[in-house]
Amino acid sequence: MNTLDDHHGSAAAERLHTHRQQFPALGNKGYFNFGGQGPLPQAARLAIQQAYDYIQQEGPFSGQALDWIVAQVAETRQAIAAELSVSPDTISLTESVSVGCNIALWGIDWRSGDHLLLSDCEHPGIVAAAHQLRQRFGVEVSTFPLESTLNGGDPVAIVAEHLRPTTRLVVVSHILWNTGQVLPLKEMVQVCHTHASRPVAVLVDAAQSVGVLPLDLPDLGADFYAFTGHKWWCGPDGLGGLYVHPQACEQLHPTFIGWRGIVSNEFGIPIGWKPDGRRFEVATSAFPLCAGLRTALQLHQTWGTAMERYQRICALSQYLWQQLQSLSGLQCLRQNPPQAGLISFQIGDFSSPISNRQHHVRLVQWLEAQHLLVRLILAPHCVRACVHYFSLESECDRLVAALEEFLNSIDQGSI
């Protein structure tokens, strides 16, 4: 099922080819941007369209349509919860990872002098939110170095060293979006929860882990786990979620408030919050997206289990990484085979960072002209390629050949 044999005429290769045909975006390009956005399956797009059609046929504010929407939301919450091995009542539906992180960041009852600790590899959106908390509430914000542990070092020990008596929250990604490093999250959470001064809560940016790693969130123990459906799950953009550990739910206050999160009495007067993750949801959303995300999840499940999909992702990423190792003038950030689907690398004169940056920008543009889509990363300045379980060895071969051609052009001075 998950062997690397797409070069050959095996039954597994034919099955994979048939599976890929359900993703129209794969038909005319080598796609290596799953960490940015996954391609939407044709069946998911049709499910969204059919959902919109049904709502309009019934009347967008009819009782029939509203009952159907309630059922759609509940089914989607259940489908997401099953993927993460959690109870549906711990899931809040959101629009994105950023929204999920902001629910946790702004829902804490911050006091001046409280400490918020971030890794040095967090997404700019999360860093900006932390800076706004500092400005508004007098929260002290600092970072701990994870980028330097990519090829050695102990992330658990490092986060422990940077905890303070005043630390209330640590923000960390499960898989680092820039380098692809998979962190020992369970152990990092444990060291935060058992901090000598007081337990420290942990917010996880799960943009690159949901849809890649087989996940059991209760086992990991994180307080907050924010994710999206439009990256590795290949769902529609605009629908994601936030897992809130049951013990953390009562301590987290809703910031944005609407009818979906409140309980009202018989006279329509708000009297409290929904007793579960729904309390952090606000109001009207693009509800037909729920049908699209569920359809995408079902499609992945037809290929194999979460573990089988992850094993193939790892095998493909190691296949690409090994080939990149052989290219003169190219350096993978990670010196050991990757543990997930993200492979970041640098090219050019490694003694001249400015020259590197110029080459990286040109490379991304040049590759797109060759119908090979990768991403530019600014910190550290590099190029990132992503492979999914339905990527092909032949696509990896094409990318490597194009990179070799680009590097030769640099040597010849033609680029």
Image (spheres, rainbow, N blue to C red):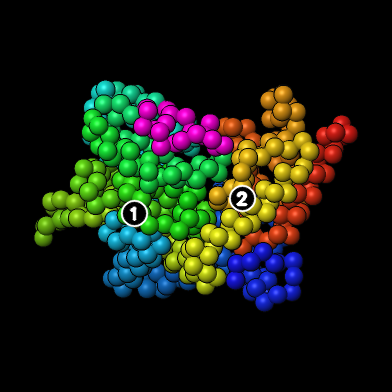
Q: Position of residue 399 (x, y in %)?
A: 74, 50
Say few, some or many: other residues with alpha carbon within 10 Å of mark 1 (under 14 / 14 to 19 / 20 or more).
Answer: few
Which residue is pictured at 26% across the width and 26% down the height?
Answer: 165
Horizontally, residue 45 falls left or right of residue 362, namely left
Q: Which mark is residue 3?
A: none
Name the quadrant containing residue 398: bottom right
Circle 1 residue: 219
Q: Position of residue 61 (x, y in %)?
A: 32, 65
Please check the rendered image and state whether residue 155 is part of the magenta-colored stretch, yes or no.
yes
The residue segment tinted magenta is: 143-162
In the rendered view, would you say 326 is above or below 347? below
Disc 1 versus disc 2: nearer the observer: 1
Q: What is the number of callouts on the image?
A: 2
Circle 2 residue: 386
Q: CA distance from mark 1 to mark 2?
A: 27 Å
Label 1 amino acid?
Answer: Asp
Which residue is pictured at 29% across the width and 61% down the height?
Answer: 87
Which residue is pictured at 37% across the width and 43% down the height?
Answer: 187
Quick one: 233 or 158, which is closer to the camera? Answer: 158
Regarding residue 122, the answer to whether it shows in the image is yes
Horizontally, residue 245 falls left or right of residue 120, namely left
Regarding residue 415, the answer to whether it shows in the image is no
